[in-house]
């Protein structure tokens, strides 16, 4: 057979390094499409002039665009037969990506654990995205539930130790970044790092009702080939599941309203796609400040934020039993750089 | 509260200058998206070679793209609590915008007038868009009806004097423009400036049935955050209102068929969004020649045109009582440069 | 009348050369949109680094993007009054197209034949697309059924002789192409030219359910103005017909899964749009290897492939009577370059 059947649980060996196919050159086109697909307005990613005024050579592409491109490359090797995308950890952005850069990706299998059913198992991989100079731009761990090909195969369990969140001293500030002459008026809000209190909840107010054409355009642009996003015959309910990363980007873009100065995503501490998202849903977002940290860079502080995408009310997350409320689509935990 | 509640009527002071947030670098991506969103084919904006043949350094982005980007920046400060976008006047394009340029915008409040209801008022602003060299690329006046926060506040009325149309001698021809070797075959039609008679009506024949995904992609690309375009919960009828500028661009692009040589928009004399446009509507367009003028530039004439977007028949505009017919979406009055 | 009524059958003179309007400069924007519209992943067209590793100066735009741009230019002159797009022959890609190139197109009428009904006729044209250096990038023959304006006009029949397929020794390999250090891991599959047997059928497995917004974005981007793709009032059934080229690109992109190394399209031998495609259809694809040939270039072989787009099962093409099965959308015959 010439086509890719995808890997099954027993095909993953701890320590194996997988080179993912199809490197991708990013241009102003991907950049513009990102702004057409999401209401993205963070000034560093919108204007070359603004980016230069904070010490970068040009305006990079959105950090999540880089994430999606790298993630997309892993799909044919990691999640084609995945039942669920279970979690993320230890994600770090290591270097901005600019128009003209070419990204490729590699993953190392760092853990496998059979489920008690015997029909599936969990696979952990650490993925690194590199640019055309082989400089790492992004790395993260994710784990997925994958079908077994044959029940009877036994696999030795290896569960990796992962940080519950990225420690502040692991954060990589882009080279040259300097927020000391940051223009708050051009950025859109006056709130500084010091204005955000741990525990504070921000309702981002705006909502977007999502369409089939949009999420498919996005998911294809990241060269993500997961069938459930494109083909109505893949699910019993005849619905196309929206790529979880589309919800992440939508929520992050909506968070501009209240977090306009939360400019540069530097770490992904964890994340859960709590419920599936479908066309017709109206996605809203709220954030909670989880932690604050200083960085060595001039004028640059870091905030650790929970970003929740929901079809319901701001601030509501779990029911009395600790389960996510049915309206919650996404619970994401990340670090972002903010002017002090 | 960290999020932007928008301004209310009594928050505007005549003479106040508002710096709008989030400068935007334009690339070939925005350019391509404009051509995907609208059936735009004017040769100056399609081909670097054609643009050079008429004296420009490269093909600029469509004039309306520049308008939308500048307009979009004003929304959070001017029209977030607007009830209606009432009109435009004294709009002039001052300099072409090219891929690589960064646009930002500033508005000056030039008028305020309370409505008799006491619940709303009209605010006039003059907005200027500038590029990364602080050269103005576009300026225009618009006025909007804005909610008052509190009925009892009194505001001194200032109504600006505005030209009913931009006089021909105010028009700014792009530096270097020369239509004397204009290639009519490559441009798509043979009609010259002299072939258009004042009063003449042109039915542009073609129609486009519009989709939700398209107008949201466009409106986001201009970083226009007005909630009614994106969120079905914003209106009682559960429909997303299409950004009026989407209708302007659609009608202008449809007008290629009959006005292929009406290349460069130089002034916006006025405009009315006569009826709301929704997904599923089939937009058509017709034009009427209102005036003709010469310019000092070689081979360059100017036409003043009425551009009407409609869901109905060409040529029909108002009923016996002078009200717009229900099928009319847009009535726009502009000046455009045409080879003599 | 200022608008283009399109040509009718009797307006075509054999030997006439038609210069098509509106040259088009391609940028990274068109490139990114192509990847958003279709699940395109062939490495030569995705990565500058990969393209350089096989001897090109940069990653070209997809061959079918160049085809659509050239085809689109011909529509106002050739197929505005066409009843059907009947076939293609002798298509050859002559030179890669890169971001920054400007394309224009010219057609020569090479045949006309009245239909027995007297109401329509067939017109054959040979179209050539050239870049800004007037170098040909693509040429092909197509023939369309066009309405007659008046039944009584008689036209002398000229039927051109056309190759049933492009002979292997007509194929033009891009200058400098060298597949001898081809990276199969980065390209996504290990199958070489020698692994494909004549007669072999490949089911490309994946499917895409298509949306109105997507095909209209695509068709506009190619500046194709055919009314039936955009305006629900054009057909009695109120449906918008999807541009046949959209189906070609979708099927070609889906064929990555099984033909990831079928990198560079060099000839179009023929093609039939067997059934109309509408929004809501789920498009699948399968291929059959028709022929193999060597080329002079290092490491470069050629495969002649049938590419079938279908709403049904792989491998099924015609019924007992030789008619296309109702699920078949497209039957395309092309040559493509593959590493040996």
Image (spheres, coloured by chain):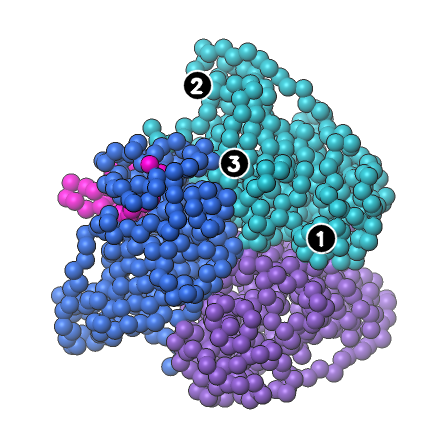
Chain colours: A cyan, B purple, C blue
Percent from the top left, x then y, of residue B131? 68, 66
Viewer-nearest of labels 3 and 2?
3
Please tell me how crowded label 1 is: few (under 14), some (14-19), or many (20+) other residues with Cα within 10 Å.
some
Q: CA distance from mark 1 to mark 2?
A: 49 Å
The label number, if any, that marks residue A51 in the structure image? 1
The relative height of residue C280 versus residue C235 in the rendered view (above or below) is: above
Give me the chain letter of mark 1: A
Q: Which residue is mark 3?
A: A73
- On screen, B162 above or below A194? below
Q: Is residue C54 left or right of residue B15?
A: left
Front label number (1 vs 2) = 1
Q: Which residues are magenta?
A: C311-340
Nearer the N terminus, badge 3 or badge 1?
1
Determine crowd level at label 3: few under 14, some 14-19, many 20+ residues with C-alpha closer than 10 A: many
Chain on which label 3 sits: A
Name the foreground residue: B290 vs C155: C155
Per the image, label 3 sits on a secondary structure element best described as helix
* A179 vs B193, nearest the viewer: A179
């Amino acid at each position: 057979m010439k086509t890719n059947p995808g890997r099954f649980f027993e095909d993953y060996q701890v320590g194996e390094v997988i080179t993912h196919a199809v490197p991708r050159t990013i241009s102003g086109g991907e950049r513009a499409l990102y702004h057409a697909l999401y209401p993205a307005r963070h000034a560093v990613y919108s204007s070359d002039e603004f980016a230069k005024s904070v010490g970068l050579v040009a305006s990079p592409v959105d950090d999540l665009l880089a994430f999606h491109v790298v993630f997309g490359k892993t799909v044919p090797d990691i999640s084609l037969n995945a039942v669920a995308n279970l979690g993320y950890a230890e994600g770090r952005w290591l270097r901005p990506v600019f128009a003209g850069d070419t990204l490729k990706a590699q993953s190392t299998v760092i853990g496998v654990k059979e489920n008690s059913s015997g029909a599936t198992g969990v696979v952990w991989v650490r993925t690194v995205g590199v640019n055309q100079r082989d400089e790492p731009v992004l790395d993260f761990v994710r784990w997925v539930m994958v079908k077994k090909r044959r029940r009877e195969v036994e696999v030795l369990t290896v569960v990796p130790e992962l940080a519950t969140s990225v420690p502040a001293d692991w954060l990589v500030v882009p080279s040259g970044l300097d927020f000391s002459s940051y223009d708050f008026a051009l950025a859109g809000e006056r709130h500084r790092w010091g204005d955000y209190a741990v525990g504070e909840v921000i309702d981002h107010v705006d909502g977007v009702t999502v369409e089939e054409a949009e999420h498919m355009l996005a998911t294809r642009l990241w060269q993500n080939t997961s069938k459930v996003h494109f083909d109505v015959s893949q699910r019993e309910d005849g619905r196309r599941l929206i790529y979880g990363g589309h919800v992440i980007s939508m929520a992050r873009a909506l968070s501009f309203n209240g977090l306009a100065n939360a400019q540069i995503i530097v770490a992904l501490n964890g994340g859960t796609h709590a419920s599936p998202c479908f066309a017709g849903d109206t996605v809203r977002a709220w954030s909670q400040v989880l932690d604050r940290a200083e960085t060595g860079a001039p004028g640059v502080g870091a905030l650790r934020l929970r970003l929740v995408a929901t079809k319901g009310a701001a601030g509501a997350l779990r029911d009395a039993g600790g389960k996510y409320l049915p309206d919650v689509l996404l619970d994401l935990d990340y670090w972002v750089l903010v002017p002090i």
